[in-house]
Amino acid sequence: MSEMPQREAYGRALAEYGDVNKKIVVLDADTSSSTLTHFFGSRFPERFFNVGIAEPCLVDFGVGLSLGGFIPFVNAFAAFLSLRAVEQVRTCVAYAETNVKLVGHYAGLSDFKDGPTHNCVMDLAVMRAMPNMTVIVPADNNEIVNWLPVIAEHQGPLYFRMSRDKSLPVHPADVKPEIGKSIWIREGSDVTLISNGAMLGRSVQAAELLAEKKISAGVLEIHTLKPLDVDAICLAAARTGAIVTAEEHTIIGALGGAVAEILAENCPVPLERVGIKDRFPVTSKGADLLMDHMGLRVLDVVAAAEKALRRKER
Amino acid sequence: MNYLSEARILELEEIARQIRVESIRIIHRRGSGHPGGALSAAEIIAVLFFDKMKHDPTNPQWEDRDRFFLSKGHASAALYVALAKTGYFPAEDLLNWGELNCHLQGHPDRVKTPGVEMSAGPLGHGLAVGAGVAMAARMNKKRCRTYVMLGDGEMQAGIIWEAANVASKYHLANLVAILDYNDVQLDGSVHDIMPLEPLADKWRAFNWHVIEINGHNIRQVRDALDLAEEVHSQPTIIIAHTTKGKGVSYMENSSKWHGAVPTAEQLDIAMRELNEAGGAK
């Protein structure tokens, strides 16, 4: 499982879950051979809808299916789902409180070869700003597979954000993710690395490097950006007195932004945000290469942790 | 389908008249709203809610009900009056429209208002949502029908044609769009701002069944809705030619009255022209 790209883990698991939950319908916008929803489509052709390159209609058609009692999984590239169809999402999903599962694919920098138009480093800020929306960023394939029944059974609007590519495995096969409940991946006493998505595995590696430097770094996974696990963030601040966030997203408005808001209002401690620093990405020959280029190296997380520690000790 | 007697036509015309009267009254009372497009839709809404549709105001979630989507959500006044008159909520609620604690929003809200199938406001959503609902009804083996009322300004939005494709691809014969074609939008005449013609040909080219009627003629509205049931492989659009602000002389065909509120004097004139014995009240 860990050898697969995230999209393949999702695509195969969704097709299997379709047998369990007959209310699931799957929609795509001419990307099913990329998102790999075609596994579901070929197994359940009567519950699969490809509407062509029409993301706004994709969302609203899914809304209609949800009003008819189905559970639509609405799949598209995150960049287009969160931006081209954003008004449909706002009005007909979030505001209208419809039971639609929006699945953003190829998010972050994972569509490295298609370039800045297809990279998506602002979707989470957009989705998090919407009332009623649940926002989830899984870290690895085991987590993705185990999220599927949870998000299908959750009543209400939900955004699920995935990478095109492989991510470093973090979770065991039987991980049981719960909405709004963060996961302590590693305990630590000097600094807490708060992360999600593809940056979680890199944060674990950073914690190991920090350990070699005699710095005890905890790793907290906040997979649910909304509703946010405020208690866990405050606990991390109390325990370690220094926080680093690491995310494959602009540092504005998503994990880094959310944690900054919580810390500032509740439990101020030094915070360093690793993420994309308010600039567009570039085209690359590999996702890891692009993540490194955009400031998401393991060493960037290590350096941020050391900086946060220095600020704490001042 | 059952024959529409002359007496029944008169009843429905009276209901349409009342929808106009009450729409203008509540817009005046709230000091905000969209009278022009509410008045142009009055007969269509009267026929749907008081004659054609299977629905149960005491059980808004009845699974087998026909569904109505007001895609041109700014005509909310006419919808609210119809919902109140059929019993989805007390008529007194109309008097509180716009109050902070009132369930009636500027544009329809499915969460707050009983009988509203879908929230609307930004134009263009209704047809794609309606297509999804029609598809769900087919998958659920329900015989209910989905009606979507569109405005002509909406025809300028790309998502309408995306939805036209989808409904056509899936042969959603249980989906009926009704276009309130009054040729007036916020900034002026539709044919000046962004011409739509040849509109019927466009819909035919998208593989829809097209019926053109006078949208203020009760019998034509009912006949078109009945005829749509005889089309078994395509969605149907009823292009209803209407008059914006129908029934109030100073509002008719005027973009000024797309979203304007009548003064007390203008309200009085409107009530007289609509033969409302009680006057402005």
Image (spheres, coloured by chain):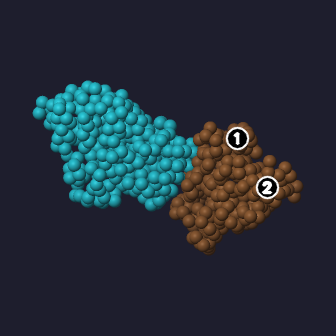
Chain colours: A cyan, B brown
Name the foreground residue: A3 vs B58. Answer: B58
Residue B197 appears left or right of A117: right
* Mark 1 vs mark 2, CA separation in Å: 23 Å
Name the foreground residue: B191 vs B100. Answer: B100
- Residue type at mark 2 is Asp
Residue A186 appears left or right of B211: left
Name the foreground residue: A139 vs A130. Answer: A130
Q: Is residue A162 above or below residue A150?
A: below
Q: The N terminus of chain A lies in which quarter of the figure?
A: top left
Residue indicated by mark 2: B268
Residue A220 appears left or right of A55: left
Mark positioned earlier in the residue sequence (1 or 2):
1
Q: The C terminus of chain A lies in which quarter of the figure?
A: top left
Q: Quadrant of residue B265 in the image? A: bottom right
The crowd level at tag 1 (other Cα within 10 Å; few <14, some 14-19, many 20+) is some
Residue indicated by mark 1: B93
| Element type where label 2 sits in the image | helix
- Residue type at mark 1 is Asp
